[in-house]
Image (tube, coloured by chain):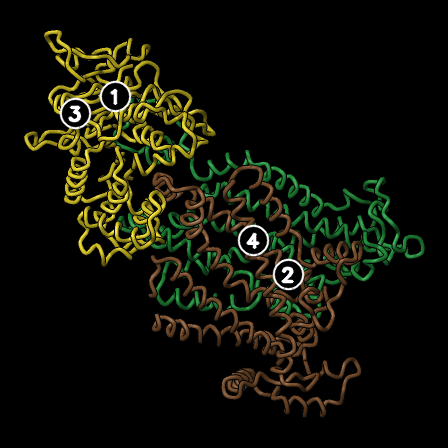
């Protein structure tokens, strides 16, 4: 198992380098100029711009810039400097990350509890009324875009019922984050419910389920032990890669509820063409994504004995 | 499963050497996967609803003028600024009210369909062809080809989809429908590539492909006559569902101000415009949202129905 | 319709049972499946019985209803789409179809156990065999995890799995096909049931392993004096272990007989065809006989005798009247004990 982990870690290196290079190329090779953006519409004299570019290393060939950047991360844990504020990207990240992590964590818990719960409920009643009701509910959730859902939640709970405040304060307390977490987690929740329902319905027909009945086991045990163990394997795979996706997908939700997290920072840096900040944030997200997929792989092997560490 | 199911006519049975002339084989319609799927689809209530909705949406997208006489882009600020909906006047320009520039919300909802449908269908076609090709080549040839292409796919998969599209779009000053299609397809092809690769690897090991190879069938023949038809089912399912997802993504990008721009009419843009007036004139936000959600729902329901029909295990 | 009579030498039922009569008796059982294409009549009035210590072999092609009957006895039919419109299944004189779900659950595994054809898919892939065996004791006898494990090792020893204690924590896919089938047998045996139903227990195995597994099953059956219903399409397997045979076709029993007599002189053209299609060394070089045609589609069972489209002896009456299962007699008119045939021309088949 130790050797497997090492091998997987080694395999992650090219993917990590590839993805960061891709975002680097997308940010810097595409038209648009972060330095010019600094001065707004007024513009600045070309000599100043040139000096600034040189200082930031933006006049170098892209691959050289990438090399320098990666060297900075690996050697000094330096993710670069935010051009607009002059602060290190690590500082910016340090401000934005905790709140997003909490938001994504809450959405994640919601997704697990409600998603699996609904899926199990529907799966055990496959083809019946409950199943169809859950199907319609999940399809509706999947179909309503996140920003529309956000407006629905805001107008109903903030404007009509006055239960929540429409915007999250700078403290971002747990209770304030409930509504954004519901909005952020809803789509994944619906996917988890569908996936759970599908795998359960499939496994209900498996031969070993028939054996479990023939053994005279009580229904609770048949479902709880024999069905669930097998059905949750693909669900856990999905969940594992989803935590990273939740953090990256918080752009819309954070904007809607005015949460000052990673999503907002990413959005700002895209609009302002803040390449360094953007690349730094995405690099962190890629690392989270890669580690979560490693954990999923390991978990998969633990849950399903047929998979070997090979 | 009970024995009885084994008597269901399987196509292989028809070739069994023991068929005697006295046996009534004709009474048993041998049904293919596709024939069976079609039969299942026709009985599925949500397929019927979604198919009807999609036909309607296509008609709206092609000839919007059939549904409203009002212009979506010309507004009358003096008379119609934030005009309230008059819900009894179904189909009239004032039906769903007016927006902040005095334009008919109903007309904008109708005319916004085209961009969404075009983006959804084009992106889906693009990613299906490109992703499908990558997945098929990777799955079929295996070895270093697979390692290379899978690595390439994984690199694109590591970037969050929406974020990548935003970065691409930000580079363009003129964000036309074509640009949005490109931005969404740029990162969207990975899912189809993975699904196709997995399906090809499974089918490749199937006995009938081994048999075809043993009989000396060439690469092209095996790929297109034997593997492609069997890979089609999972790919079609994923593609149909993702069509709805792309429409939703386009609206999200337009909402964020990074997607389509005027003069193109887009629901996402209208919803974004309505958001600033959410307390005074909710109708500007509500009706495009409803239309958008119904459109996405129609395609996702169609995908679900197709999945149900093509994958009997989930029934 | 008649039931299969007891053969002459039947060991007495185990103690603690005041019920007289067969251990299990199926009476006029009908099973149908409601599908999209119509009602599939899988079982149409089956009667048979098994005594303690006795082996009944149920023979037939796939789709003959042999497995469906067994599943109805076990209570593991998928209902819906399955339905039992008619019939009784008496276990020790009590109709199981009238019992509550809980009463039936208490019989399953404890009194009647089942061995399935494909042990790999029938064992749970993500649980160790020790867990799956021990589960029987934990659920039905309330044993602790530790005691259940000890019992599970004992069971594995009993079905002759080498190094049982070491392999108790292995998963099903880590065993060979024959060993897996032994685990299935061990699981069925765990609570020493009165009756075991084995649904094609050796079909998925290599020929050499088939014999070992069958011998083991027969040996354990003798040891515990259990009733055994052996479902198979393999006439070769039957000859060695069965006491009596019921041949099924299209959801009906078409012939019953004590085991040896059927080989000597079958009383139904279908049985005759089956026997003729077994390859024999003394007929080397000759063309092998095969029954023409396919098993009937149970949605549209042919009128009259279901076998008539494939039968070499079919006459007009075979296409109009369903032949009842009646006792057959020898050439001299004496009744042949335990022998019945559902053929209008049984005399010609048996004596012709």
Q: Quadrant of residue A250?
A: bottom right
The residues tagged by marks 2 and 4 sit, at their Cα atoms, a distance apart of 13 Å
Q: Chain of mark 2?
A: A
What residue would you read off at disc 1? C21
Establish whether labels 3 and 4 are both on one chain: no
Q: Position of residue C149 (x, y in %)?
A: 29, 53
Establish whether labels 2 and 3 are both on one chain: no
What residue would you read off at disc 4? A115
What residue would you read off at disc 2? A184
Q: Are marks 1 and 3 in contact (CB under 8 Å)?
A: no
Q: Are marks 2 and 4 in contact (CB under 8 Å)?
A: no
On screen, residue A178 versus residue B202, left or right, reads right
The residues tagged by marks 3 and 4 sit, at their Cα atoms, a distance apart of 58 Å
Which structural element holds mark 3? Answer: loop
Label 2 environment density (alpha carbons within 10 Å; few <14, some 14–19, many ≥20): many
The number of numbered discs placed on residues in the rendered structure image is 4
Which structural element holds mark 4? Answer: helix
Q: Which mark is residue C10?
A: 3
Q: Residue furthest left?
A: C282
Chain letter for the part of the structure drawn in yellow: C
Image depth: mark 2 or mark 4 in front: 4
Name the residue located 33 percent from the left edge and 62 percent from the top edge. Answer: A308
Looking at the image, tell me whether mark 2 or mark 4 is earlier in sequence order: 4
Asked if one can make out residue B32 in the rendered structure from this viewpoint, the answer is yes
Which quarter of the rendered picture does the C terminus of chain C lie within?
top left
Name the residue located 68 percent from the left edge and 45 percent from the top edge. Answer: B57
On screen, residue A253 versus residue C54, left or right, reads right
């Amino acid at each position: 198992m130790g050797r497997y982990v090492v091998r997987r870690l080694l395999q992650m290196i090219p993917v990590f380098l590839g993805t960061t290079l891709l975002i680097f190329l997308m940010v810097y090779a595409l038209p648009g100029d972060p330095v010019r953006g600094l001065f707004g519409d007024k513009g600045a004299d070309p000599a100043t711009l040139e000096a600034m570019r040189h200082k930031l290393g933006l006049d170098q060939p892209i691959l050289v810039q990438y090399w320098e950047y990666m060297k900075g991360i690996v050697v000094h844990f330096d993710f670069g400097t935010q051009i607009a504020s002059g602060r290190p990207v690590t500082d910016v990240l340090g401000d934005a990350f905790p709140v997003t992590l909490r938001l994504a964590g809450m959405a994640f818990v919601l997704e697990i509890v409600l998603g699996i719960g609904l899926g199990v409920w529907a799966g055990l009643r496959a083809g019946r009324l409950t199943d169809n009701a859950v199907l319609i509910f999940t399809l509706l959730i999947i179909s309503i875009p996140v920003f529309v859902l956000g407006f629905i939640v805001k107008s109903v709970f903030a404007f009509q019922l006055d239960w929540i405040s429409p915007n999250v304060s700078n403290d971002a307390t747990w209770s304030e984050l409930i509504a954004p977490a519901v909005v952020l987690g809803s789509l994944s929740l619906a996917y988890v419910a569908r996936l759970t329902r599908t795998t359960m319905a499939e496994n209900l027909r498996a031969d070993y389920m028939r054996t479990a009945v023939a053994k005279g086991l009580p229904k609770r045990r048949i479902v709880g032990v024999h069905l669930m163990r097998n059905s949750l394997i693909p669900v856990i795979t999905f969940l594992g890669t989803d935590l990273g996706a939740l953090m990256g997908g918080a752009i819309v939700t954070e904007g809607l509820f005015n949460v000052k997290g990673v999503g907002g920072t990413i959005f700002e840096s895209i609009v302002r063409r803040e390449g360094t900040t953007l690349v730094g944030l995405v690099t962190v997200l890629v690392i989270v994504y890669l580690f979560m997929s490693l954990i999923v792989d390991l978990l998969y092997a633990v849950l399903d004995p047929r998979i070997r560490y090979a | 499963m009970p024995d009885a199911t084994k008597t269901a006519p399987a196509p292989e049975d028809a070739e069994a050497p023991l068929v005697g002339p006295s046996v009534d084989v004709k009474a048993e319609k041998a049904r293919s996967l596709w024939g069976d799927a079609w039969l299942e689809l026709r009985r599925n209530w949500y397929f019927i609803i979604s198919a009807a909705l999609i036909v309607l949406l296509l008609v709206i997208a092609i000839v919007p003028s059939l549904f409203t006489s009002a212009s979506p882009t010309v507004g009358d600020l003096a008379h119609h600024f934030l005009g309230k909906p008059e819900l009894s006047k179904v189909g009239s320009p004032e039906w769903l009210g007016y927006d902040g520039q005095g334009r008919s919300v109903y007309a904008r909802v109708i005319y916004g369909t085209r961009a969404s449908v075009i983006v959804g269908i084009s992106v889906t076609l693009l990613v299906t062809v490109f992703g499908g090709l990558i997945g098929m080549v990777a799955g079929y040839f295996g070895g270093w080809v697979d390692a290379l292409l899978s690595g390439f796919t994984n690199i694109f998969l590591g970037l969050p989809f929406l974020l990548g599209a935003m970065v691409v779009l930000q580079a363009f000053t003129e964000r036309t429908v074509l640009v949005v299609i490109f931005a969404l397809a740029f990162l969207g092809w990975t899912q189809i590539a993975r699904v196709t690769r997995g399906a090809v690897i499974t089918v490749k090991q199937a006995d009938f492909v081994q048999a075809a190879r043993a009989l000396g069938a060439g690469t092209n023949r095996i790929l297109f006559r034997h593997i492609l038809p069997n890979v089609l089912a999972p790919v079609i399912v994923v593609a149909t569902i993702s069509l709805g997802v792309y429409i939703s993504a386009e609206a999200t990008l337009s909402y964020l101000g990074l997607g389509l721009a005027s003069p193109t009419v887009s629901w996402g843009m209208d919803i974004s415009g309505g958001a600033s007036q959410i307390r005074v004139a909710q109708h500007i936000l509500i009706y495009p949202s409803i239309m958008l959600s119904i459109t996405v729902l129609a395609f996702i329901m169609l995908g679900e129905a197709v999945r149900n029909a093509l994958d009997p295990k989930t029934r | 319709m008649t039931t299969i009579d007891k053969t002459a030498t039947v060991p007495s039922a185990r103690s603690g049972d005041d019920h007289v009569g067969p251990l299990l008796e199926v009476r006029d059982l009908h099973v149908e499946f409601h599908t999209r294409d119509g009602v599939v009549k899988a079982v149409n009035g089956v009667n048979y019985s098994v005594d303690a210590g006795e082996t009944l072999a149920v023979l037939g092609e796939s789709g003959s209803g042999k497995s469906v009957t067994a599943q109805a006895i076990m209570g593991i039919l998928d209902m819906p789409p399955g339905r039992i419109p008619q019939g009784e299944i008496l276990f020790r004189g009590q109709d199981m179809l009238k019992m509550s779900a809980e009463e039936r659950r208490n019989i399953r595994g404890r009194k009647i156990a089942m061995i399935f054809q494909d042990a790999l898919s029938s064992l749970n892939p993500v649980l160790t065999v020790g867990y799956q065996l021990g589960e029987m004791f934990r659920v039905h006898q309330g044993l602790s995890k530790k005691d259940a494990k000890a019992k599970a090792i004992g069971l594995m020893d009993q079905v002759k799995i080498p190094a049982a204690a070491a392999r108790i924590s292995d998963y099903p896919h880590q065993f060979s096909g024959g060993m897996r089938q032994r685990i299935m047998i061990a699981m069925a045996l765990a609570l020493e049931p009165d009756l075991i139903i084995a649904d094609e227990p050796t079909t998925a195995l290599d020929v050499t392993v088939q014999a070992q597994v069958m011998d083991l099953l027969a040996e354990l059956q003798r040891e515990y004096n259990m009733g055994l219903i052996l479902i198979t399409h393999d006439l070769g397997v039957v000859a060695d272990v069965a006491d009596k045979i019921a041949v099924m076709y299209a959801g009906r029993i078409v012939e019953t007989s004590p085991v040896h007599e059927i080989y000597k002189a079958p009383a139904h053209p279908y049985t005759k065809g089956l026997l003729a299609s077994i390859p024999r060394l003394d007929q080397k070089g000759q063309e092998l006989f095969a029954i023409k045609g396919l098993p009937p589609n149970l949605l549209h069972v042919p009128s009259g005798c279901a076998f008539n489209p494939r039968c070499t002896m079919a006459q007009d009456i075979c296409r109009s009247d369903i032949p009842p299962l009646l006792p057959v007699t020898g050439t001299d008119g004496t009744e042949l004990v335990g022998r019945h045939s559902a053929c209008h021309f049984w005399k010609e088949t048996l004596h012709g």
